[in-house]
């Protein structure tokens, strides 16, 4: 029996090869919107959908009665309507272990860029001010400073490992769903998130986006931070109220921010973040190294084959 999987964006060659070896035909979408995908899913009566961050809606799941599996390349399942998939007995799979080190490394880069005021310094040098170092203030070593982690799951712990072991930082964190014995690294867990916002020199978000966490970070939290502190978000843009972050930065409540994710992606070209000197931006590329893409593609394709063969999966995104 041969199966068909549609990939909504280009799939890495490693995935094409793995699926071909296991008798699965891959159809690469020629569309970039829900209506087009529904048509392609229906025309091909696909058994699986392979996605990155594009929204997987009920109408897309209804378009093929053969649909058995939705595979996400990476972590963060907020783009998939999980309850609806579960109600239709469609298995969701993902590959969170494949990109956790990559996102942690990306967050480390953003942290260093904040600590060294990289965006400002780069701008000055390109404008002819090679002597910027003589007037530079507000730059810091990471060593001896405190990272605050909101959410202490996979990525957060990888990040803490780099910062504690590599830079000699102190890590504090808040995660009501984790106990100290589950931590692989020395993060001092606080009883409240407020303690983390107040005590850290840098606060980094590592939460999944869901009904509990969406827009849960705003002016109240930013106002608690030290005025010298910076905020980092490599998790999801809709976890924060962006207007509140802009206000906190403009009022000097916090020193800077580094963001990989945004409420609206792509970030609109008239967005205030784009002109703010104390904000470092990257285009949702925290997990986009080629190494990570290959690892996540391979895992997600292995999981697709497991589901199609009726075998157990290692990384289920829902319970059927
Ligand atoms: N920038 C990128 O390209 C990129 C790539 C991968 C993942 N991500 C994002 O990073 C997020 C985290 O990924 P992960 O693999 O570490 O997930 P994870 O599930 O291992 O960790 C999330 C942690 O948040 C905790 N948590 C939940 N609600 C909380 C709350 N209200 N307060 C504090 N902690 C809470 C959970 O207990 C869990 O330990 C993903 O959900 C995804 O949105 C972004």
Image: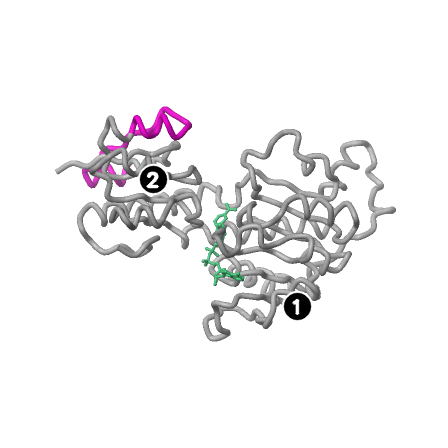
User: Which of the two discs, 2 and 1, sits closer to the camera?
Assistant: 2
Per the image, the residue denoted by label 1 is: 195
**74, 108: nearer the viewer:** 74
Q: Is residue 282 left or right of residue 212?
A: right
Q: Is residue 153 visible?
A: yes
Q: Quadrant of residue 265?
A: top right
**Residue 148: percent from left, percent from top:** 63, 62
Residue at image position (33%, 34%) is: 7
Q: Is residue 65 left or right of residue 167?
A: left
Q: Which residues are magenta?
A: 17-40
User: From what the image shows, is residue 189 above or below residue 125?
Assistant: below
Per the image, the residue denoted by label 2 is: 58
**Does the magenta portion include 247?**
no
Q: Is residue 168 visible?
A: no
Sequence-wise, which precedes: disc 2 or disc 1?
2
Disc 1 residue lies near ligand 1 with CB under 8 A: no
Q: Secondary structure at mark 1?
A: helix
**113, 91: nearer the viewer:** 91
Residue at image position (55%, 33%) is: 266
**Does the magenta portion include 38?**
yes
User: From what the image shows, is residue 100 above or below residue 282?
Assistant: below
Residue at image position (32%, 35%) is: 60
């Amino acid at each position: 029996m041969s199966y068909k999987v549609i990939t909504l964006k280009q799939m890495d060659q490693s995935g094409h090869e793995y699926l071909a070896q296991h008798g699965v035909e891959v159809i690469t979408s020629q569309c970039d919107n829900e209506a087009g995908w529904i048509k392609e899913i229906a025309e091909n009566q696909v058994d699986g959908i392979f996605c990155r961050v594009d929204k997987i809606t009920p109408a897309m799941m209804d378009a093929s009665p053969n649909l058995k599996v939705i595979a996400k390349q990476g972590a963060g399942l907020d783009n998939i309507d999980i309850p609806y998939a579960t109600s239709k007995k469609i298995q969701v799979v993902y590959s969170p272990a494949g990109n956790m080190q990559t996102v942690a490394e990306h967050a480390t880069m953003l942290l260093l860029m904040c600590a060294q005021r990289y965006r400002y310094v780069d701008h000055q040098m390109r404008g002819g001010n090679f002597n910027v170092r003589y007037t530079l203030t507000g730059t810091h070593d990471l060593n001896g400073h405190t990272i605050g982690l909101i959410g202490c799951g996979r990525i957060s712990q990888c990040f803490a490992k780099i910062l504690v072991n590599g830079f000699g930082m102190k890590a504090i964190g808040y995660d009501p769903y984790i106990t100290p014995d589950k931590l692989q690294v020395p993060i001092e867990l606080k009883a409240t998130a407020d303690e983390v916002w107040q005590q850290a020199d840098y606060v980094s978000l590592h939460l999944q986006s869901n009904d509990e966490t969406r827009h849960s970070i705003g002016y109240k939290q930013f106002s608690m931070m030290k005025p010298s502190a910076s905020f980092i978000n490599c998790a999801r843009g809709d976890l924060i109220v962006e207007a509140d972050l802009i206000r906190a930065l403009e009022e000097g409540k916090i020193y800077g921010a580094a963001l990989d994710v945004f409420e609206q992606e792509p970030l609109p070209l008239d967005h205030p973040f784009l002109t703010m000197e104390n904000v470092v931006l990257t285009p949702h590329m925290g997990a986009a190294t080629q190494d990570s893409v290959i690892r996540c593609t391979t895992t997600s394709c292995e999981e697709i084959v497991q589901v199609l063969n009726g075998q157990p999966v290692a990384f289920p995104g829902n319970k059927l």
